[in-house]
Amino acid sequence: MKFCSLRSGSSGNAIYINHKDVHILIDAGLSGRTIERALLNIGVNPKSLSAILITHEHKDHIKGAGVLSRRYNIPIYANKATWGAMEKDIKEISEKNKLYFTTGEEFEIGEIKIVPFKKPHDAVEPVGFSFKCGDKKISIATDLGYMTRGVANHLIGSDVVLLESNHDIQMLINGSYPWPLKKRILSNLGHLSNDAAADTLMKLFKMKAIGIAFLGHLSQNNNRPELAFTTVTNMLKKSGVKFEVRLALRNIESDLVEI
């Protein structure tokens, strides 16, 4: 399988996963043109997309989904509650391209086995995803207020994990956001901090070593890429945990990783 974070951040999210002739987009939270350019930058023709999978209905995850579906005849997968919440923003697409999954139940696209798993966030029925093909596994968990045992269990044993590292707590508290928004971000239905991301990775390592960890969904206002990276890697080093950490950024594609 191949993995690339096309964009990751509060301004828009899109992730690419591939195996053989199956090309999957997880979220499409940017303009269709931006996503098309990002795909072309990694050598992928947007016409080859097999499916768009949606984690939840927030605009930074669905903005370009309807456009791409209409332009390239791509099916969009989401659970029933998310479809109900986002349908007015997706706008009209072909009925055959409106597909449903059930949270917690495995389904397949080609040879890729996909599990949408429940996560805590302020959306109607938000999910993360794990993707398995043979003995290889990729997992995605951003936009979650705290790390539950259930989410952690889905991340264990992943060759690649995209994990939220949204904010530095002090930057958020001392920043310009209104207090109600700060409370939302810090709540159990908000977003993981850099410290929480590091703590999660330490626990995952103790349960079963993982491969590459990408830190994603970094806040533009309450974090900095170098701060997220340094905070997480320093905490891991102090605990004797060693594995590769990379960044998934808001304005450029990550490395295309093949496992």
Image (cartoon, rainbow, N blue to C red):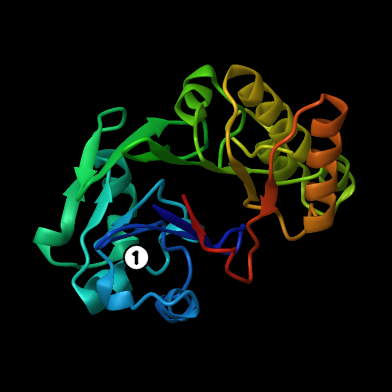
Residue at the spot 19% in from the left edge and 50% down from the top edge: 110
**Residue 127 appears left or right of 201:** left
Can residue 45 be seen in the rendering of this structure? Answer: yes
- Residue 245 vs 5, above or below: the answer is above
The percent position of residue 111, horizontal first and vertical second, equals 22, 46
Badge 1 is on which residue? Answer: 65
Describe the element under mark 1 as helix, strand or loop: helix
Identified by mark 1, the residue type is Ala
Residue at the spot 65% in from the left edge and 19% down from the top edge: 206
User: Is 110 or 87 nearer to us in this picture?
Assistant: 110
The percent position of residue 103, horizontal first and vertical second, equals 30, 32
Residue at the spot 65% in from the left edge and 62% down from the top edge: 249
At label 1, counting other C-alpha atoms closer than 10 Å, the crowd grade (few under 14, some 14-19, many 20 or more) is: many
Name the image quarter holding residue 69. Answer: bottom left
**Residue 9 appears left or right of 176:** left
**Residue 249 appears left or right of 125:** right
Residue at the spot 28% in from the left edge and 59% down from the top edge: 20
Name the image quarter holding residue 183. Answer: top right
User: Is 112 or 24 nearer to us in this picture?
Assistant: 112
**Residue 110 appears left or right of 155:** left
The percent position of residue 233, horizontal first and vertical second, equals 80, 40
How many marks do you count on the picture? 1
Can residue 129 be seen in the rendering of this structure? Answer: no
The percent position of residue 231, horizontal first and vertical second, equals 84, 41
User: Is 73 or 50 nearer to us in this picture?
Assistant: 50
- Residue 111 vs 258, above or below: the answer is above
- Residue 21 vs 103, above or below: the answer is below
